[in-house]
Image (tube, rainbow, N blue to C red):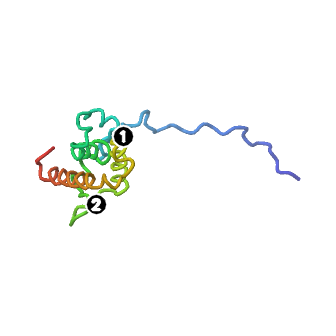
Amino acid sequence: PPPSTHNLPTALPPPSTHNLPTALPPPSTHNLPTALAVPEVTLAKYSKLNVISKVSTLAVKLARESYFGKDILKSSTVAGCREHPALSKTKLMELKAFLIRQYPEYWGNPAEFETKWCTCLDSINQCCKNLRSGRIK
């Protein structure tokens, strides 16, 4: 015979809320990275730097405000050195791609952009060092 369904509750009782807090505390923001800006916002903020002669300065601003943040730059180097880990190669390539899109004169031959990119990497590395030494905040 099938099991009896007599004496079984038709619905489960609501879960007990006894001893539960009425509101959750706000999440802690301690040790969380600062939010990064969208690269286009940073570019608009520093529009006067959007000329090829200032590409390395723009690269530093973008690295600091849109791709890595001050804390990551402070604790890293471009390639990694001693106790300082390397910056993410993926994010560096994203930064490079974003920069090259700003300069149509390099679209046909991205290899020509490489000397500019090397200058950008040197500037980002210098920014990392200056953040660690306290020369810039």
Mark 1 or 2 closer to N-term? 1
Number of residues whose C-alpha sits closer than 10 Å to that of mark 1, classed few (under 14), some (14–19) or many (20 or more): few
Q: Secondary structure at mark 2?
A: loop
Q: How many marks?
A: 2
Q: Secondary structure at mark 1?
A: loop
- Please indicate whether residue 19 sits to the left or right of residue 36 in the image: right
Residue at 33% of width from left, 42% of height from top?
103
**As shown in the figure, which amino acid type bears the numbered disc 2?**
Ala
- Please indicate whether residue 100 sits to the left or right of residue 22 in the image: left
Most extreme residue toward the bottom is 82
**Residue 34 in picture, x, y percent from top left:** 29, 42
Which residue is tagged 1?
27
User: Is residue 107 placed above or below 82 in the rendered structure?
Assistant: above
**As shown in the figure, which amino acid type bears the numbered disc 1?**
Pro
**Residue 101 in picture, x, y percent from top left:** 37, 43
Residue 86's tag is 2
Residue at 60% of width from left, 36% of height from top?
14
User: Is residue 72 placed above or below 80 in the rendered structure?
Assistant: above
Residue at 76% of width from left, 42% of height from top?
7
Number of residues whose C-alpha sits closer than 10 Å to that of mark 2, classed few (under 14), some (14–19) or many (20 or more): some
Look at discs 1 and 2 and give the one toward the viewer: 2
